[in-house]
Image (cartoon, rainbow, N blue to C red):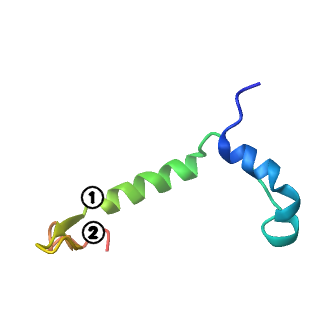
Amino acid sequence: MAKESFTQKFMRATGKLRIIFGPAHSSSIDHEMTEANRRLLAQREAETQQWETLRRPDGSTYVVPRNPDDKSLR
């Protein structure tokens, strides 16, 4: 048996509390990605490529389009 992760130990230890206070459903966290999830991940990664994060002198950041004329994913 593989070593249990902290998350799995926590979920097992708090199982009865989650029945009362939170989501009682638990699913496997170490499952294979489905083809639909792979496609969705690829789409989300492509969407993030169209943005650029800029930093102001005061340290705050904001997001702007890399190419303002590209409307393909917006």
Residue lying at 85% horizontally and 63% vertically, measured from the top left: 17
Position above or below: 7 against 63: above
Q: Is residue 50 visible?
A: yes
Tell me which amino acid carries mark 1.
Gln
In the picture of the structure, the residue carrying the numbered disc 2 is 72
Residue 23, percent from left and from top: 78, 66
Can residue 29 be seen in this snapshot? no
Quarter placement of the N terminus: top right
Question: Whole-percent x and y of residue 28?
Answer: 73, 46
Image quarter for residue 53? Answer: bottom left
> In the picture, residue 31 is in which quadrant?
top right
Q: Residue at x 32, y 68 (%)?
A: 73
In the picture of the structure, the residue carrying the numbered disc 1 is 49
**Where in the figure is residue 37, as x and y percent of width and height?**
55, 52
Residue 70 as seen in the image, left or right of residue 40: left
Taking the image as shown, residue 67 lies to the left or right of residue 1, namely left
Query: Where the C terminus falls, by quadrant?
Result: bottom left
Q: Nearer the viewer, mark 2 or mark 1?
A: 1
